[in-house]
Image (tube, grey):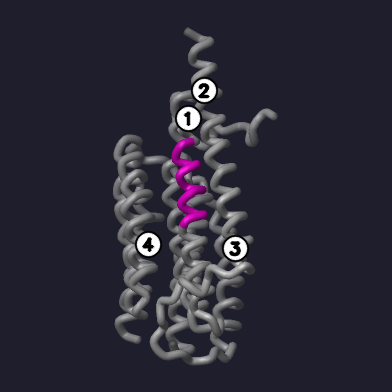
Amino acid sequence: MLLLSALACTAVLTSLVVLLTRDNFYASMFMSAAMIMVATIYALFDLQPVFVLIVFIFVGALGIVTVALAATYRFAPGRQISWLWALPVVITALILAFSVYATQLAPLGKIQFALQGFITPEYLLLIIFLTSLTVLLLLSVLKMGLKYKDEEGGES
Amino acid sequence: MQATDISIIYAASFAILLIGYLTAISSKDVIRLLISLELMFGAVFMSLLPLFSAISNAPAAFGIAILTIFTSSGELLVLIYAIITLDRQKKNIYTSSVTIGGDKL
């Protein structure tokens, strides 16, 4: 529990630095550190496949692209925050945390990685929906790209 | 997984989510917005962890985790492309330059 608390505190502190720093580059670096801490908590519970997925996809691919973008657009923006918004968010978080703490959950031992059982007809529909969503997202990106290319061609 | 562990995980997850929200509403450029969204997804991943002990079949929890990771990655990739397009068109990345949403059909 001590290790879990330490990891969770580190994740929260690194994400707090993201909020406080004014440099986008450092913000993206600390965001990557927070994501690695989240992934490490998965590894702590012996869920290494999820750790690998988060580190490879989120930190390895998206995190690096974000760091590169932040290093390109590295300037200090001003603040336009209304701290009154924090109050309802904190109250909601406290209520949710208390309800989760009060709920009795069945204790489990070591969690086994068994994805084979996931591919059932029930979840197959979900996977088809996800594939359709991905195709739609990529088509939208392609449309945006082609539209910009057409506009650029029209200007020149 | 004990109830104390789950409470710690949820408390940290809510804290990261709150920080992500605060970063998002205080951001003046879209890069900071992208970073805050990734933080929020990190909080979501953390809150998925108790699912592995809360439901009886672990494969479903793994499936949900994998679907969440891939879906959020797809969304963030589209956002990254949108940022690059915004920079090309508006020559800046300020959120104030985004005056209208959606796409023309």
Marks 2 and 1, how far apart in space? 8 Å
Above/below status of B63 relative to B32: below
Residue at 49 percent of width and 25 percent of height: B90
Find the magenta span and give its range: B70-81
Say which mark, if any, is on residue B9. none
Foreground mark, 2 or 3, reads 3
Residue at 39 percent of width and 68 percent of height: A50
The x, y position of residue A81, in whole percent, is: 52, 50
Amino acid on which the number 4 mark rests in the picture: Leu
The chain that hosts pointer 2 is A
Q: Quadrant of residue A87?
A: bottom right
The residue indicated by pointer 1 is B85
Marks 2 and 3, how far apart in space? 36 Å
Marks 4 and 3, how far apart in space? 21 Å
The residue indicated by pointer 4 is A53
Amino acid on which the number 3 mark rests in the picture: Leu
Say which mark, if any, is on residue A148. 2
Is residue B72 inside the magenta stretch?
A: yes
Q: Earlier in the sequence, mark 4 or mark 2?
A: 4
Q: Earlier in the sequence, mark 4 or mark 3?
A: 4
Foreground mark, 2 or 1, reads 2
Marks 4 and 2, how far apart in space? 33 Å
Above/below status of B103 relative to A10: above
Amino acid on which the number 2 mark rests in the picture: Tyr
The residue indicated by pointer 3 is A124
Q: Secondary structure at mark 2?
A: helix
